[in-house]
Every structure is written in structure tokens, then in C-alpha cells.
Amino acid sequence: MKERLVTIRNKAGIHCRPSSEILNAIKQHFPFHHVEVSAGGETVEIDGSILSLISLGLACGTSAVLRIEGPDEDAAISQIGDLFEKEFDFPPR
């Protein structure tokens, strides 16, 4: 299992659109991974539901621990962790 500390940089936090992009990346590139996120004393398993991720209330500046287990964990933790730290711009310019 790989673990990475991420800091949310998106001004609006991790809301519906960023959650959707994160979940789509997990489903497309790392479908056989166990992914969980911990923040503020709460841990959720990212199970394909946007609500599980949104329930953490990850606001800008919040730190969270991302844990990933499965094949090619190094690539998974790098790509998914980068999405958590991405500054999303919706709509894209």
C-alpha cells in the first residue's frame, strides 16, 4: 500500500466536478485498486461514488492522506495524488 499526503489547491475545494474527474481517472486507469482518503479524522473508501469523496469536505488548503493499494501503486498514487492537488478551472479556459 502506498500513501501520500496531498494538499487541496483548488479554490473551491473538491466539489462535484473535481470529484468526478478523480473518480473517472481511478475507473479508467486503476480499476483494480483500493483507494481511500483520510482527512479531519474521517476516512472514506473511494468506491465509485462522488458522495463518498464530497463527504470529506475537502476545502482549499486542507491536507488529506491518500492511500492506494493494487497493481502499479507508484503510478496510481502519483496520478491520483496530482489530481487532488490540481487547480481545476471550470469551465476550462
Image: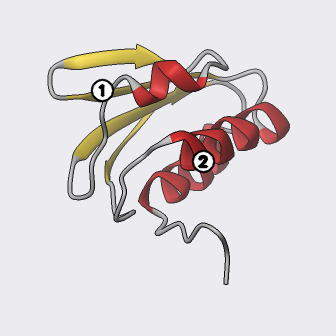
Q: Position of residue 83 (x, y in %)?
A: 55, 55
Q: Amino acid at mark 2?
A: Arg
Q: Is residue 70 above or below residue 93?
A: above
Q: Is residue 42 above or below residue 90?
A: above
* Furthest residue toward right: 28
* Furthest residue toward bottom: 93
Q: Amino acid at mark 1?
A: Ser
Q: Position of residue 86 (x, y in %)?
A: 49, 65
21 or 64: nearer the eye?
Answer: 21
Q: Position of residue 23 (x, y in %)?
A: 66, 35
Identify the residue under disc 2.
Answer: 17
Residue 86 — which label? none
Secondary structure found at label 2: helix
- Quadrant location of residue 71? top right
- For discs 1 and 2, the disc positioned in front in the rendered view: 2
Answer yes or no: do the residues labelled 1 and 2 have beta carbons within 8 Å?
A: no
Identify the residue under disc 1.
Answer: 38
Secondary structure found at label 1: strand
54 or 77: nearer the eye?
Answer: 54
Mark 1: few/some/many CA within 10 Å (<14, 14-19, 20+): some
71 or 88: nearer the eye?
Answer: 88
In which quadrant is the C terminus drawn?
A: bottom right
Asked whether the viewer can see residue 1, the reply is no
1 or 59: nearer the eye?
Answer: 59
Task: Kindly report the distance in space between the C-alpha atoms of the residues bearing marks 1 and 2.
Answer: 20 Å
Horizontal relation, residue 67 to residue 20: left or right: left
Q: Residue at x 32, y 17 (%)?
A: 43
